Amino acid sequence: MLSSLAPARRRLLLVAGTLLAVLVLLIVVVVAVRSDGHSASSPAAAQDRPGPVLLVPGYGGSVGALSTLAARLRAAGKDASVVNLPGNAEGDLGGQAAVLATAAKAALARTGAASVDVVGYSAGGVVARLWIKDYGGAAPVRRVVTLGSPQHGTALAALGSLVAGACPLACQQLVPTSSLLAALNQAPELPAGPVFVSLWSSRDEVVLPPDSARLTGAVNIEIQQVCANSVVSHAQLPTDPLVAAMVLSELSSAPARALTAADCAGLRAG
């Protein structure tokens, strides 16, 4: 056995055995940590316990329209705040996801809540999914509502990329064939844990086609399938009263559900 081997060879075998044991341990750890960045044993957020709401701006970073939606959420009793993204939200979407992660930690520390809810407008919905799927955001998030988000890209970004200097990095990452979207949309499109609700308008003139917002595994809602006469455009999504009522419905303590035409009158009245 080992005692019969020369000392040098015995030491070599012992070192090799130790390295093999360390390698096996590392593999176990990697397997245990899911691709969404949290331990497989981390419990999902309780769906009947809404937390503070973080609203994530779209490309361009304007907070004005989302401030209107945040005010409506606060009037309904929600703790809602808009995340300020750096560089007019025109830089790397991954960097924006890191800013969202910091905002979520601050919101949890400030409120003592167990989880947060996220509303992502336009590219902000892509940022939210990027954080949750690839940057460890799944554990602290209960529910995500996206508004007109180009989850599979938009032809408008592809067109902009043809003009020199007209399409900054975030725009390039929203081209349907971008490497970022290709990686993000690998199955499964959604990580285990948070519930996703995707709202979009067939009248969207920025996200082309509008159903680029559709996500496999999410509660997918085309606004015109709920209220057929809605003419809400992309820019109007954060300020439209009907959309605000839909967002409030989906952020309640009740299970997220696909709204239908039977809900239209109630949502309009709200």
Image (cartoon, helix red, strand yellow):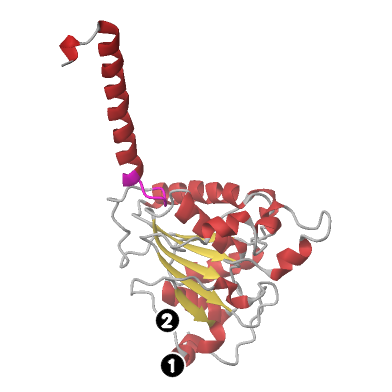
Residue positioned 61% across, 61% down in the render: 57
Secondary element at tag 2: loop
Which residue matches tag 1? 262
Image location (x, y in percent) of residue 99 = 55, 48
Q: Nearer the viewer, residue 29 or 71?
A: 29
Q: Which of the 4 image quarters holds residue 251?
A: bottom left
Cα distance in 3D space between marks 1 and 2: 11 Å
Q: Which of the 4 image quarters holds residue 18?
A: top left
Image location (x, y in percent) of residue 204 = 66, 78
Range of the magenta residues?
Answer: 31-37
User: Is there any visible trace of residue 66 in the rendered image?
Assistant: yes
Secondary element at tag 1: helix
Q: Nearer the viewer, residue 27 or 190?
A: 27
Mark number, residue 183: none
Which residue matches tag 2? 258
- Decide if residue 242 is on the left or right side of residue 1: right
Image location (x, y in percent) of residue 95 = 59, 47
Local crowd size for mark 1, using a 10 Å CA cut-off: few (<14), some (14–19), many (≥20):
few
Residue positioned 77% across, 63% down in the render: 160
